[in-house]
Image (spheres, rainbow, N blue to C red):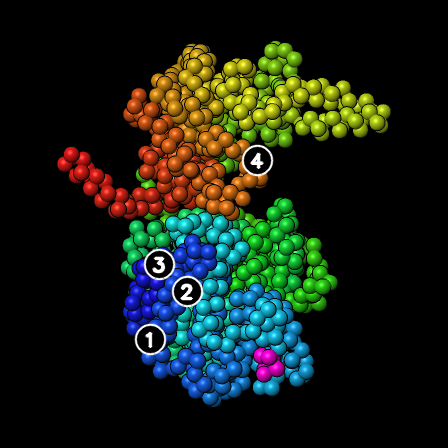
Amino acid sequence: MKPVYFFDEGDGKNKKLLGGKGAGLCEMTRLKLPVPPGFIITTEVCNHYYQNNKKLPKGLLAQVKKNIAKIEKKTGKKWNSKDNPLLVSVRSGAAISMPGMMDTILNLGINDVTVEGLAKQSNNPRFALDSYRRFIQLFGKVVFGVDDKKFDEVLETAKKNQAVQSDGALNEKSLRGIVSEYKKICEKYAGRPFPSDPFEQLELAIKAVFASWKGERAIVYREKNNITKDIADGTAVNVVTMVFGNMGNDSATGVVFTRNPGDGTKHIFGDYLLNAQGEDVVAGVRTPKPIDNMKVELPTSYKQLENTCNKLEKHFREPQDIEFTIEQGRFYLLQTRNGKMNAVSMVKTSVDMVKEKLINKDQALRRIQAEQLEQLLHKTIDQNKAKGFKQVTKGIAASPGAASGVVVFDVKKATTMGENGTKVILVREETKPEDVPAFFAAAGILTSRGGKTSHAAVVARGMGKPCIVGCSDLKIDYDNGKCVADGQTINEGDTITIDGSSGGIFLGEMPTIQPQITDDFKTILDWSQKIKKIGVRANADTPDAAKLARKYGAQGIGLCRTERMFNAKDRIGLFVDMIMAKTLDERNVVLEKLKQLQKSDFIEILKAMEGYTVTIRLLDPPLHEFLPNPEELANKIYKLEKENSTVGLEQTKTILNRARDLAEINPMMGHRGVRLGITYPEIYRMQIIAVFEATAELVKQKVDARPQIMIPQVSSVAELNHIKRIYDEIKSEMEQKYKQKLKIDFGTMLEVVRACLTAQELANTAEFFSFGTNDLTQATFSFSREDAEGKFLPEYLEKDLLEKSPFQSIDENGVGSLMKIGIAGGRKIKPKLEIGICGEHGGDPSSIKFCHKSGLSYVSASPHRIPIAIVAAAQAVLEKPQKTNKKAKKKAKKKSKKR
Ligand code: PEP
Ligand code: MG
C-alpha cells in the first residue's frame, strides 16, 4: 500500500483511493494548471485507521515529513520557519463529494514563531495575526470539539472593546489578545497545551479529518444520499500549500461553476470576495459579490479564470465546480470537481453538451442521475392566482421550486415538526452542515446571509429543495421567535411561501401549479425511450392518474389496485354496506351498485391507456381495513352511552361486532387477496364481470382496450385454478351476451415466496406474471412492511446491517434470487411469458437495472416516477458489463475445459 501521493504522482482516475478532491488536484497538476503543491493521504489509510483502533499506520508520519520536504522544495518556503514559513491546509475528500459534511483545517503550521514569519512574508502583521486566530478557532473546533460560540464571544468582546463593527477593523493589539484568549479556551477544553509543533498539529489534524468520516452529519448524509461503501469508502486527506486570498485588495477567493447549476445556461456562475479566505465564501459569513463584478475589479485574473473554465470543461467533459484563490494578483486553483447541479441544469447541460459535441447521447444519458429528475416535477407559483399575496421581501434565488410552510427558526424544532408531517420553512441567518437533518425535513429553506454557493444554497440545490439565501432585509430575532422585513413582522408559526426560482418571499400559502416538461427534458426522454429495452408501465388506479402517466410516457398500466377505487369518499359507505351485508342476497344488491362504479372507472382508465395493456388487480386488502378502527368505535359507543344518546348507537355496535369478527392478529398474512376471492367469490365475480362489461362496451366503440385480470397473494396453482374457473365461466357468459370474443388475459402476482418457488406450476394457468415485490420483500425478510421502516430499519441502516432499505431497492441476493427462480420457472413452461414488476421497486433506478438484467418484460411505477423509470431503463442498457466478471468467467471456462 502506497499511503501518500504527491500531486504529480496521481491522476484523476482513482477517486476511490485519492478521493474526488485529491484526484482532481492531481489531474489539474498534470494539466499544468496553477495548483499549489501538496499531497494526498489515501482512503486506504483512513480504513487502516479505523481497522486498527484509530491508529495511523507505522511509517505514515515519516512519509508525511518526506512530502512536506518536497513541498518546501517546490515552494521555497520552510516548515516551522520564522522567516518564510510554509503553511498548509488539511482537507477531507472522499470519492464522492459530500459538501461541508467533513472537516477542513486552514493555516496549519502557524504558531507563535511562524506567525512572525508570516507577518514578514506578507508585510502585514495584522493579516498574520488574523490567520493565526482563524487557525486556532478551526483547529479547536475540529480537533478538540470546542463550540464556535465560545470563540465568537471573545471576538465580539474584542470588537466592543476596540469600538469597531467588523472583524476586519480589529487592530494588531486586539488580535494578539484574541489569539491568547482562543488558546486558553482550547487548553481549558482539551486539558492540554495548545500544540505549537507543526508536525504535531498535522498529525492531530489528519486524525481529526479521518474521524469526521464517521461524524454524525457525514453518516446521515451518506445514508440519505445512498452513498454505500462501494461508492465511497473512507476519506482521503489533502495537505495543500496555503495560498491567501486575504492579503489585500489584489487578493480574492471565489467559488464558481462553469455553467449555471440552477438552469444549465452556459456562463460562469458564482461569487467571489475580495481580500478574503475561502471559508468566508463557503460558510456564507460575508455576502459575496457576483462573479461578473470581477471582470471590472480584477480583469486579468478574470481572463485566467475564463480560460481555466474552458480548459477544464474540455478535459473533464463535465461542467466543473471550481474553487480559486488570487494571492496578490497570482491565480491559483484549489479544487475542481464535477458540478453538482439540479435536474433542470443536468438535463439542459446534457442536451447542450451533445449539441456542442463535447459528449455523445449515450454519455449524456449516463451522466444523469435518474433519481434527481423528480425535481423537474416540482411545483411553481401559479402567477394567475398570485395577485392577492403580499411579497414581503426578496432574497437570492438559490434552488428552484415553490414551497409553503410555517416559519420555524430552530433547527431541532424544524426537524421534529417536519418529520411529523408539518410543512416547515426553516428560516436562519446562515446554515451549517450540522443543520442538514432539518433540510431533509423542511419544505424549503430561507437564510438572511450567504450567496449562491453558501452552504444552504449548495445543500438545498443538491436535494432539490426550494431555497432562498442572502435575504439581507430579513432581520431575524431568534430569542423572540420572529423576523422583520420591510416593517413586516413574521412570527414563528406564520405561514409563508418561498419561491426558490425568483427569490420572492410571500405571506400565506400561495396556489401552485404542477411543472411542465421542458423541451430539453422531452429530448432526454425521447433518447431514453429509443434506447431502453424494458417496458415502463404505471401503477395507476384512477382515470386522472392514468392520463398523467401516459403524458409522462408510460406505455400501459402494470397495476390498477381496484380497492383504491373503493376508498373514495362517495364509495366507502357502499363498500362498508357490502361488508356488513347479512345475507348473500343483501351483499349482491350492494355489489351490483359497486360494479357500476368500477365499470365506469375501468372504461375511463382503459380509454386513457388505449392501445396499451392495463393490468387490473382484483381486491387485495383484508376487509377490516375498510371498517373504522374497533378502538374508535368502542370510544364512540362509550361516549354515546354516557350522554344517554341512542343516535347511531345500535349501528355503531353492529359495526364494532363485525370489525371484531374480521380483526386479525397478522392481517398482512391474513384474510386478503385470493383468499378473499375464494371465501367471498361474489366479490371477485363482480369485479371480473365489471372488467368484461367495460371491455365489451369499449370494443363496441372501437376503442383498443387491452385489460388483463390479475390475482393477488396467490401461493398455489390450486388457488389460481379455483379463480380461473370463475373467470372462464364469466368469460363464456359475457362472450355470449355481447356476441363477441373478448381477449382479457388472466394472470397472477408473484408476491408470496411459494408462488416464486412453484412458478412452473402457476405458468400452466397464468398468461402473465407480475412480481409484487412489496409483499415479496416482506415475506422474504419476515419484516412487516407496515412497521419495519418506522421501527427498526433506520437502526439497521445506521449499524450497516443493511446498505439500503429493501423496501426501496430490491434486495438482489434474497428477493432477487426468488425472482430469478420465478422467472426461470415461468419461462420454462411459456418461453415468452410476460413478466413484470409492480412493487414500489418498479420506480427505483437500481432496481430497474436489476429487472432489466433479469429479463423482465416491464417495470411499473407510480406516475410521478415514470420519467425516472424511463431514463433508468435506458441507463440499464448503457451500463457497461463488468469487465472483471467477464474475464473471470472466461478464465473459469478455460479451466473447466482443461479439466
Ligand atoms: C406488492 O406487494 O408489491 C404490490 C404491488 O401489492 P400491494 O403493495 O398493493 O400489496
Ligand atoms: Mg402485494
| Callout 4: SS | loop
Q: Secondary structure at mark 3?
A: helix
Amino acid, disc 3: Leu
Q: CA distance from mark 4 to mark 2?
A: 41 Å
Residue pointed to by mark 4: 787
Mark toward the start of the polypeptide (4 vs 1) = 1
- If you read the primary sequence from the N terminus, does the residue marked by circle 3 or circle 4 appear first? 3
Amino acid type indicated by mark 4 = Asp
10 Å neighbourhood of mark 1: few (<14), some, or many (≥20)? some
860 lies above or below 825: below
Q: Is residue 896 above or below residue 28?
A: above
Label for residue 797?
Answer: none
The answer to which of marks 1 and 2 sits earlier in the sequence is 1
> Which residue in the structure is indicated by mark 2?
237
- Give the foreground label among 4 and 2: 2
Residue underneath mark 1: 70
Measured as percent of width and height from the top left, residue 508 is found at: 66, 54
Secondary structure under the numbered disc 1 in the rendered image? helix
Labels 4 and 2 touching (C-beta < 8 A): no
Q: Earlier in the sequence, mark 2 or mark 3?
A: 3
Q: Position of residue 561 (x, y in %)?
A: 51, 29
Mark 4 / mark 2, whichever is N-terminal: 2
